[in-house]
Image (cartoon, grey):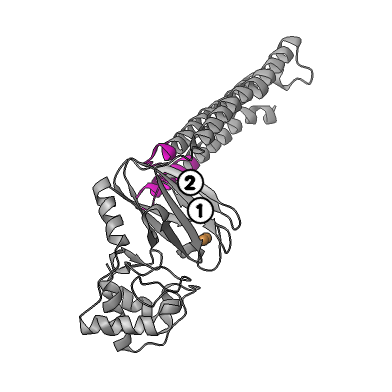
Amino acid sequence: MTRRSREPSSGPVRARFGTLAGLLIAVVGIGALAGCGSGSPSALDPHSPQARRIANLFWLMLVLAIVIYLLVVGMVLISLRTRGSDPDAHSDSPGPERRSLSNRFIVIGGLAIPIVVLSVVAVATVSATKALENREGAIQIRVDAEQYWWRLIYEQDGVVSANEIHVPVGKPVVLTLTSDNVIHSVWVPQLNGKVDVVPGQTNRMSFTAQQTGTYRGQCAEFCGIGHALMAFVVVVQSDADYQSWLAANRATPAAPTDPNVVAGQRLLVEGSCAGCHVVAGTAATGTFGPDLTHFGSRGSIAALQLPNDPDHLARWLAHTQDVKPGALMPQIDLTQDDVDHLVAYLESLR
Ligand code: CUA
């Protein structure tokens, strides 16, 4: 008697505690998701039809999960309540009515509803995946994943750049993804889902950016010590701005006249830099590292590790391995004058 009289009170208390814990987890989870939206790129802040499909799929699954969660918790609470007040519930041989109710509940709750829910999710997922497979595009850009930066080749326009993918707004873009080293993965959450970059295979990603702006991307597959520092941006511009960016990046920089810049150019072309870097119009023709022909016009250094200004560039040249541990650019012995001259030259390359 003592045992039975305790059950109805301790059951609901425990259930209420469980509900509270569940709510707490949900609130913390939603808070964490909201945190993704501030500052860092969020897949829930789509700026292309492709990213919107992915975000919609997420919301559909989240709503279904919440509804099912509330249903299950609700039924657990109801069963705890009725079990406490229904003496028949403790009987070892329930009557035929109760058995038939249980069977119906199992068929509907355990079979019919899951089949409907999973079918809805399956159809939505397959149709979204199909839509993302459309690889038609006016703008074709080859993206070679290097360790740990991105080489960008606009073959139709004769432009080679690094880490800043410029595209025009409202036009379908196709990125052709290749790697000659290890597996990487391209991810710009606001424009499309992840696509792996696999050696010996050409993958493609397409998107149509709907709003001008700068969208951060990141390598999303562990590729070595510098993986976390392998970022990039997609710069979405008006068509006119994009065309003038292309024209500026096609041009060969004028020969320098400023003595500091001339000294920097001589250092780069005659020193070890030229073994790995190209500067169009000079004898620097190495292709192992990023093309530096228009380095001064880029917004960042070392795949977004530093803003591109003279102070940060000096730091990069003098402390390469501290700024980006594992970078394949070796620490080069440079005097302060060398650094100053190289900075003057590189920043002049626009
Ligand atoms: Cu490239 Cu991770």
What's the residue type where badge 2 is placed?
A: Met
Magenta range: 25-52
Q: Nearer the viewer, residue 216 or 247?
A: 247
**Residue 160 seen in this snapshot:** yes
Q: Position of residue 22 (x, y in %)?
A: 52, 38
Residue 197 screen position, x and y as percent: 54, 54
Within 8 Å of ligand 1, the CB of disc 2? no
Question: Quarter holding the N terminus?
Answer: top right
Q: Is mark 1 within 8 Å of ligand 1?
A: no
Residue 27 horizontal side relative to residue 341, left or right: right
Please determine whether, in this image, residue 59 is positioned above or below residue 271: above
Q: Compare residues 279 and 13 and report the one nearer the observer.
A: 279
Q: Earlier in the sequence, mark 1 or mark 2?
A: 1
Label 2: state its secondary structure. Answer: strand
Query: In terms of image quadrants, where is residue 322?
Result: bottom left
Return the x and y of residue 159 as percentages of the image width and height. Answer: 37, 59
Image check: 283 left or right of 127?
Answer: left
Q: Is residue 141 within the magenta segment?
A: no
In the picture, the disc for residue 177 is 1
10 Å crowding of disc 1: few (<14), some (14-19), many (20+): many
Q: Residue at x 31, y 61 (%)?
A: 249
Instruction: Give the residue at mark 2.
Output: 205
119, 77: nearer the viewer: 119
Residue at the top extreme of this rendering: 97
Residue placed most toward the observer, 157 or 348: 157
CB contact under 8 Å: marks 1 and 2: yes
